[in-house]
Structure formats: C-alpha cells, structure tokens
Image (tube, rainbow, N blue to C red):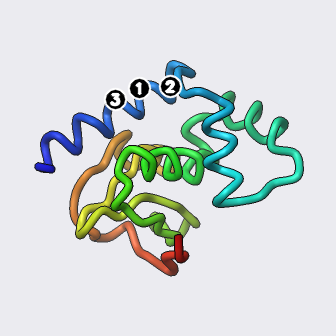
Amino acid sequence: MDLMKTREIACRVRADFEAGAIDESELKLLYRQYNPLDDIDSFMAHAREMFPRLNCGLATVYLKKIFPDGKIAMGKYGENNHTFLLLDELVIDITSDQYGGPKVYVGGLQSPWSISNIPAT
C-alpha cells in the first residue's frame, strides 16, 4: 500500500474516532486483547469524552485491525508514554496531537517518536 493511501485511511479512522463512529463493542473486544481492564465500560466512556487524550492504545488497536500487518509499538512521543502503530518502517499515529504533534502522522520513525517495546501479538 502506498504512503498516500495509508495516510488517507489513517485520516478516515481519525475522523471516525472524532465522530464517535467506531463500533464500541468491537473496540472493547479489540482493546481487551491488548489491555484486559476490569471496568472497560467506564474506561470507554471516559476515553470517548477525552479523545485524543489517553486514547493512543484504543486508536492503535483499531488501526491494527485496519492494517493487520502492523505492530503495536509502545514507546514515547517526546517525554510522554505513547502507543502507535508501526507498519513496516512507517509510524501511523492518530493521537499525537494530545502532546502537540500532528492529528495524523504517517511517516518514518523519527524524533519525537521512539519505541521501547513491541509486544508479541
């Protein structure tokens, strides 16, 4: 898939999150595989209100569904803990604006992004 098409899809996913158009039951299921929270309902209610803040994990697990070859990367955006999708050599991040970054970033791994861990999936 080319860079422009990947960015177009990432922008559409971002718009769907902003509009509350992502199916919540599907998102809960995806997120539980990543982080098995006891009170997912409360977490989801707060997450929707706060988007993009504290939504990097939710957004990333959904992006992984869209880009199944991607890997969930746990790392940092500057000094902030952050989660984003790594697809081949591309970072796909639709929540870095919570730290002053772009609303949607599709590009190479570069500062201020860094990776600490890529969990096995």
Tell me where residue 48 sits by quadrant. top right
- For image coordinates 62% across by 39% down, the residue present is 27
Tell me where residue 68 sits by quadrant. bottom left
Label ID, residue 18 = 2
- For image coordinates 59% across by 35% down, the residue present is 51
| Disc 1 element | helix
Residue 87 rendering spot, x and y as whole percentages:
30, 62
- For image coordinates 30% across by 49% down, the residue present is 105
Label ID, residue 48 = none
- Disc 2 to disc 3, how far (Cα)? 10 Å
- Disc 3 to disc 1, how far (Cα)? 5 Å
The residue to which callout 1 is attached is: 15
The residue to which callout 3 is attached is: 12
Which residue type does callout 2 highlight? Glu
Q: Are marks 3 and 1 in contact (CB under 8 Å)?
A: yes
Which residue type does callout 1 highlight? Ala
Pointer 1: residues within 10 angstroms few (<14), some, or many (20+)? some
Q: Are marks 2 and 1 in contact (CB under 8 Å)?
A: yes
Pointer 2: residues within 10 angstroms few (<14), some, or many (20+)? some
Left or right: residue 121 versus residue 24 is left
Farthest bottom residue in view? 116
Left or right: residue 16 versus residue 111 is right
Q: Would you place residue 91 above or below residue 115 in this image?
A: above
Q: Is residue 53 visible?
A: yes
